[in-house]
Image (cartoon, grey):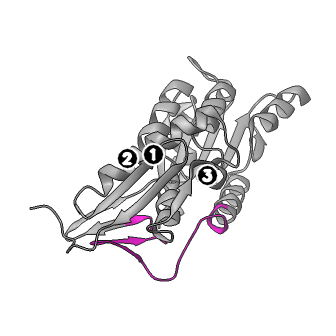
């Protein structure tokens, strides 16, 4: 699986150097130039790691990180900054940063830290040696790819985490709190709304097999059900 990097950096030259270096190492790099654009890119395509400058126009890195953390509490986050005040560093870690690099830095140092955080993230993901069977679909947790007939879609990290859990608990009631602990490590009102949004996306991904249903058990959680009738993609 090619890991997705979201790089949010308003210095065009530095952004080019970082993106080209990481791309040469086999990573899929998406570049944004301010916090608002970065947040939009994260919402639309997700990321396996976020690298962000602190001082940026329109929305700074700290505010963007707070909003990203409300969507995905696990995605690794590295801050890049020319600021050295201890209060700034503390604030970054309190928001949920995994690492901090002061400018100027050596690209090798950034590459090593990115590789280390991605390795740690893979260990925290539900991965199975063989693809999981869900009705007429196959789900490869190594690549996060969901396939039916000739159609394949690559799920985001959060979608994959939720679906892998459902796929190993087909027909069982899964409490919302269980899924929120799995994805965000805590249960709160905002995460419940986010969870509902991800369930909606999974329903769309699974819509080509009418035998598959994700049932909403109001006030409790969800159940992934696969009927006994023959499964198959819609014509």
Q: CA distance from mark 1 to mark 2?
A: 5 Å
- Mark 1–mark 2 CB contact (< 8 Å): yes
Q: Is 28 placed above or below 45 here?
A: below
- On residue 90, the disc is none
| Residue under numbered circle 1 | 198
| Residue under numbered circle 3 | 183
Foreground pick, 27 / 187: 187
Q: CA distance from mark 3 to mark 1?
A: 11 Å
Q: Is 21 placed above or below 82 here?
A: below
Residue shown at 49%/39% (left/top)? 42
* Magenta stretch encompasses residue 141: yes
Residue lying farthest to the left in this orientation: 235
Residue 76 visible in this rendered orientation of the protein? yes
Q: Is 221 placed above or below 213 here?
A: above
Magenta extent = 121-145
Percent of width and height locating residue 131: 42, 78
Of helix, strand and loop, which one carries label 2? Answer: helix
Residue lying farthest to the right in this orientation: 86
Percent of width and height locating residue 72: 59, 44
Foreground pick, 133 / 174: 174
Left or right placement of residue 71 versus residue 2 in this view: right
Percent of width and height locating residue 202: 38, 52
Which quadrant: the C terminus? bottom left
* Magenta stretch encompasses residue 12: no
Circle 1 crowding by C-alpha within 10 Å: few under 14, some 14–19, many from 20: some
Residue shown at 46%/61% (left/top)? 163
- Mark 3–mark 1 CB contact (< 8 Å): no
- On residue 201, the disc is 2
Residue shown at 52%/33% (left/top)? 38
């Amino acid at each position: 699986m090619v890991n997705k990097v979201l790089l949010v950096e308003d210095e065009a030259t530095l952004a080019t150097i970082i993106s080209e270096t990481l791309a040469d190492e086999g990573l899929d790099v998406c570049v944004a130039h301010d916090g608002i654009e970065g947040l939009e890119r994260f919402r639309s395509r997700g990321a396996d790691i976020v690298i962000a400058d602190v001082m940026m126009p329109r929305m700074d890195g700290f505010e963007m990180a707070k909003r990203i953390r409300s969507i995905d509490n696990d995605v690794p986050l590295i801050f890049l900054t020319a600021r050295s005040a201890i209060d700034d560093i503390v604030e970054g870690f309190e928001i949920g940063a995994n690492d901090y690099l002061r400018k100027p830095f050596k690209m090798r140092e950034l590459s090593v830290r990115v590789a280390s955080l991605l390795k740690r993230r893979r260990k925290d993901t539900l991965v199975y040696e063989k693809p999981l069977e869900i009705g007429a679909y196959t789900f490869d947790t190594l690549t996060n790819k969901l396939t039916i007939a000739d159609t394949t879609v690559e799920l985001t990290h959060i979608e994959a985490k939720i679906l892998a859990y459902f796929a190993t608990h087909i027909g069982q009631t899964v409490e919302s709190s269980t899924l929120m602990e799995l994805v965000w490590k805590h249960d709160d009102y905002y995460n419940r709304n986010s969870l509902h949004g991800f369930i909606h996306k999974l329903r769309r991904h699974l819509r080509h097999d009418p035998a598959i249903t994700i049932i909403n058990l109001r006030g409790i959680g969800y159940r992934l059900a696969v009927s006994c009738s023959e499964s198959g993609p819609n014509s």
